[in-house]
Image: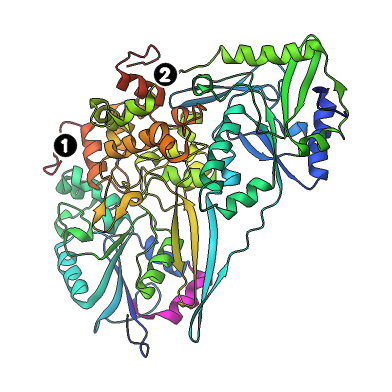
Amino acid sequence: MTSDRPAVLTLEGLQGLIEALAAEGYRVLGPTRRDGAIVYDAIAGLDDLPAGWGDEQDGGRYRLVERGDAALFGYAVGPHSWKRELHPPHLTLFRTRREADGFSVEAAADEPEPTAFLGVRACELAAIAVQDRTFLEGPQADPHYARRRAGSFLVAVNCGEPAGTCFCVSMETGPRARGGYDLALTELLDAAGHRFLLEVGSERGRALAERLDARPAEAADLAASRAVSERAAGRMGRRMETGGIKALLQENQEHARWDQVAERCLSCANCTMVCPTCFCTTVEDTSDLSGETAARVRRWDSCFTLDFSYIHGGTVRGSTKARYRQWMTHKLASWYDQFGVSGCVGCGRCIAWCPVGIDITEEVAAIRGEKNPESAG
Amino acid sequence: MASPTRKPRLAVWKFASCDGCQLSLLDCEDELLAVAGALDIAYFMEATRGRIEGRYDLSLVEGSITTAHDAERIREVRRRSRRLVTIGACATAGGIQGLRNFADVAEYAAAVYARPDYIATLATSTPIAEHVPVDFELRGCPISKRQLLEVVSAFLAGRRPVTPAHSVCVECKLRGTVCVMVAHGTACLGPVTHAGCGALCPAYDRGCYGCFGPKETPNPASLSGRLAALGMDGGQLGRVYRSFNANAPEFRQESQRHGRQDEPQDDQG
């Protein structure tokens, strides 16, 4: 492959792509089936991919299902997001040691391995772009995120199988990747065979693609790839009306719906943990028994905990209502004020992984005063 | 802080309990010498002979109050302790023996003992904090060794221990465990349970049993709705909250909402 013209990879070609990434020194992560879900983990080749598996998702429910075909990427998104890699759950920031005249501080080593992500969905590319704004733009870039981001090679795979909880079309983030990737694949599984349309999105991507055994794409391949995305776009399980959403939420802070959702909300923080854009952390300082050393560890935090808004004198958001309202209003409204975009990419994880199935699209519709036909009541 | 010339004196006290939590201290193995180096272990029946005398800088109290004698003894322990930390579900919630709070203790005693008249016991099992002021409560059945070391280290440094009160779900998500309730339909108390175990059971494909008791601002009523949808009937919902932390207020009230009509009702509920 020698140009930016789309090409076509066979299954062997895809294996070649994984091997080429590994040969370039990347740790290759991709989808794999484990513990009843499709999670992201280290992969060595096609055998690690969840061939023939898809998922069924609804509020508070996720199940793997056999597809009856050989699709390697025939699922939507699972419990993990790439946030785990770019913004790790735990990160030691520094260690200190008591000295004769005070104490010394030593920054913790932070040399992340270059990592290739295989199977990044369009909604996830959008989420990474949202986190780029959070961590890289503005006066204080986060060096840990920056290092991981610079060392990441993104292989997008266009979504062909949205879940019942998906609404990327509403958020205008998918289902087709529109940039932000190094390489993008579309899995094609039709009479012409099991193959992948390969598109180049960066210089790095081009350099890698040139080393792959691929044939130029024909018009039929391009049409098939477009058809995959069109079909996916027509099969969104959820929708969210986003017109005027910032004002809607910011002007309805005393809406009765907040009380109703608080009756159901467990304040367990699952939604924020699985959200690919939620970025909040706290720091935990620990010292050893001898009092000689101490360490500061950053870990994921959530606006659903009491500690999150604890300041001198107490917790600002004591009620679950206040915490749910804060989360949703930040995500869908004040994120625009802060970062210029919505904090929601429509991946639906917060719906599926909420133990009681609270549905952000249903909450928005309720505050709008619309009856949501999807709502079970 | 204690003066540098004298190590803080540690005491470990046992009330109604199984000893599992205080054994967590001996289980520290690698860190035990460091504990002994940092503290003067002045009273710890599981490890050394010792006598109750003088004052203690840090008292770790295991167990619940189930007898009139213990209700008096804990006052003496409090009087002798600069800091009193309760460890484990018995001490912080009343323990599994708190099940008596839902039943007639005389009936129990008659069923179990040949001579129930030899048994001098209170009608209830109650946490230490219902009897004396407690400086810090460390949850768990049993407690986590890691958290115990954290509490002791924090005491020595004069700082607040890092033992977050959020849900077990946060711990599952931090370690990357797939949610057993959402993905498998397994009943799980994780969303209403206090973190601390590191989300042990879900990592082994089991639902959370609630060993660390209610988390901050729990919502068991909402969770029960989900558990019912997963197939639990009223009797099961009445029992699922009744284990080691049955007497913790939020678990007690939720279990009573689903409980039998003939059992003693909770006057605090």
Q: Nearer the viewer, residue B224 or B94?
A: B224
Residue at the location (18% across, 55% down)? B115
Q: Position of residue A206 (x, y in %)?
A: 80, 34
**Which is more toward the observer, A99 or B266?**
A99
Residue at the bottom extreme? B5
- Tell me: residue B25, above or below residue B230: below
Residue drawn at x 50%, y 72% is B31
Given the image, what chain letter belongs to the residue carrying mark 1? B
Residue A345, which numbered label?
none
How crowded is the residue under tag 2: few (<14 C-alpha within 10 Å), some, or many (20+)? Answer: few
Q: Is residue B250 above or below residue A11?
A: below
Residue B244: where, in percent of width, then height? 32, 49
Mark 1 falls on what kind of element? loop
Answer yes or no: is residue A260 visible: yes
- Residue toward you, A338 or A67: A338
Q: Quadrant of residue B228?
A: top left
Magenta residue span: B28-43
Mark 2 belongs to chain: A
The reply to whether label 2 and label 1 mark residues of one chain is: no
Q: Amino acid at mark 1?
A: Glu
